[in-house]
Image: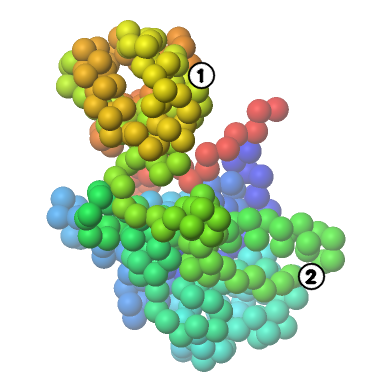
Amino acid sequence: MNAVFKDLKVVELAGVLAGPSVGYFFAELGAKVIKIENPKTNGDVTRSWKLKTENPKDQGSAYFWSVNAFKEFISLDISLPDHLKKFYDIIKDADILITNFKFGDEEKLKISYPTLSSLNPKLIYASINGFGQNSPRTAYDLILQAESGFMSMNGETNSKALKMPVALIDLLAGHQLKEAILLALLKRYQTNKGCHLSVSLFDSAIASLANQATNWLIGNQLPQPIGSIHPNIAPYGELFDTKDKQLVTFAIGNNRQFKQLCELIGFAALANDTKFATNQLRVSNRLELYSLLYNYIKQFNFKELYRACEKREVPIGKIRNLKEVFDLPEAQAMIKKFSFNKKEYQSVSGIAFKFLN
């Protein structure tokens, strides 16, 4: 599987996270990915986004390496005629170009789709932008989290708007562009022609609002910050302390799971209480329900509770920090090791699927 795209040449004229995550996807699957960086800006800006624990002399940061392993790096200032010519030479036999330029910059730099497709009619030109192909707005993930409603829903009740700890909108846009490119490759196989694709961060965010969008559009309920709980399901997302001071949560999605949870903690009568007989009633009375469950759950050690839930197919999760996460064998299997300038690095694979035959 790792070499499925071994005959593909991808050129990346993109920085930060969204565009480079797409290049990383193809690089992991065997494509030749050439990342072109401007020497005037010392390359991708995220090379300089270093934690205080990182070596300031290193050529990349932990952030940079999250989506830039397994690529070739070429330094070109395409505003210079001789560098632009070198870029054109690279593009002539490329399959895919990934860009994230501001509105108007592609024409100004002489790298627009009409220009490049005249050099390479089979080129798939994949653009990422903030608010649409014709919008001049500069966009970072934080701005899109704010503008698309995500921050208004995130946080505890009555808290101020809160951003997510991962640049999720960038990653969502990256997934949208991957899907579009794969469809474009299929189309090219049928027509022998390239095409121009555009994905905006804003559209990617709106497309991912899912049930929160329909809670407003159909349910006429404006989503508010409610912590980790679910607006449509209970108990779902409430946090419980165990006897051995572990923090756990449950995702109770139906009446059977609720009945099993009540029985395994020794409170079977709760499942028959008319105030909690249906999910809608449990949502309406979730604070009282939480209080009742909490007093029973805190009598169990985590491992005992986990085994009982697993036996009865009750969804339970332990709140883990990243050290604990990467102690898990399943997470360790997602770690990719690579070297750059004779230094060893580790990053996480961007590929979560497996071919089973």
In the rendered image, is residue 37 in sight? yes
Task: Specify few, some or many for label 2: CA neighbours under 10 Å numbering under 14, 14-19, or 20 or more.
Answer: some
Left-right relation of 165 to 332: left
Residue 187: horizontal and vertical position, in percent? 78, 62
Kind of residue indicated by mark 2: Lys
Quarter that holds the N terminus: top right
Q: Are marks 1 and 2 in contact (CB under 8 Å)?
A: no
Left-right relation of 116 to 17: right
Q: Which residue appears farthest toward the right when viewing the image? A: 190
For disc 2, the marked residue is 193
Q: Looking at this view, is 346 or 114 the one in front?
A: 114
For disc 1, the marked residue is 256
Q: Where on the picture, by quarter, is residue 274?
A: top left
Kind of residue indicated by mark 1: Arg
Residue at 21% across / 12% down in the picture?
299
Q: CA distance from mark 1 to mark 2?
A: 53 Å
